[in-house]
């Protein structure tokens, strides 16, 4: 069976995992799942994570390939602030420098 460039042969690529960190709304996650990859998708923003869960529910064929993890990823600092862009509340970042928290 010939496969298209960049895709896995079917059935889904049980030995291929796509890691998506900072998923936002999941464009890459859902694309990778559609291409047959199992995904581990990490998103810390509660509103974005809720939308990801809804998208997963609305895509029952892809859902078994998508593993959502609600978490932020940082460089190891124990205390960070979540900073939201007021113009784009789905775009969040972490500030782990306590001296900047004024």
Image (spheres, grey):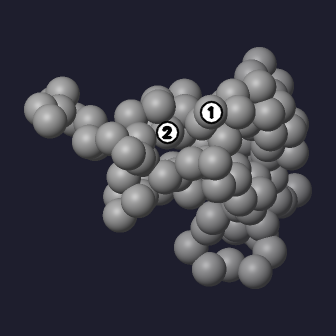
Tag in front: 2 or 1: 1
Residue 68 point in image, percent of width and height: 69, 53
Name the residue nearer the viewer: 48 or 87.
48
Q: Residue at x 68, y 78 (%)?
A: 77
Q: Is residue 25 positioned above or below 96 on the image?
A: above
Task: Name the residue carrying label 1.
Answer: 61
Inspect this view and state whether residue 81 appears.
yes
Q: Residue at x 60, y 42 (%)?
A: 23
* Mark before the other along the chain sequence, 2 or 1: 2
**Quarter-wise, where is residue 16 in the image?**
bottom left
Name the residue nearer the viewer: 1 or 32.
1
Q: Is residue 20 positioned above or below 47 on the image?
A: below
Residue 77 is marked as none
Hey, which residue is sitting farthest left in the picture? 2
Residue 49 point in image, percent of width and height: 79, 43
Task: Name the residue carrying label 2.
Answer: 33
């Amino acid at each position: 069976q010939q496969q298209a460039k960049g895709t896995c042969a079917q059935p889904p690529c049980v030995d291929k995992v796509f890691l998506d960190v900072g998923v936002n709304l999941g464009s890459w996650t859902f694309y990778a799942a559609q291409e047959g990859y199992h995904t581990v998708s990490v998103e810390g923003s509660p509103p974005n994570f809720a939308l990801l869960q809804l998208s997963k529910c609305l895509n029952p064929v892809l859902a078994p390939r998508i593993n959502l993890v609600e978490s932020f990823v940082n460089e190891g600092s124990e205390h960070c602030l979540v900073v939201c862009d007021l113009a784009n509340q789905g775009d969040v970042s972490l500030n782990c420098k306590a001296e900047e928290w004024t």
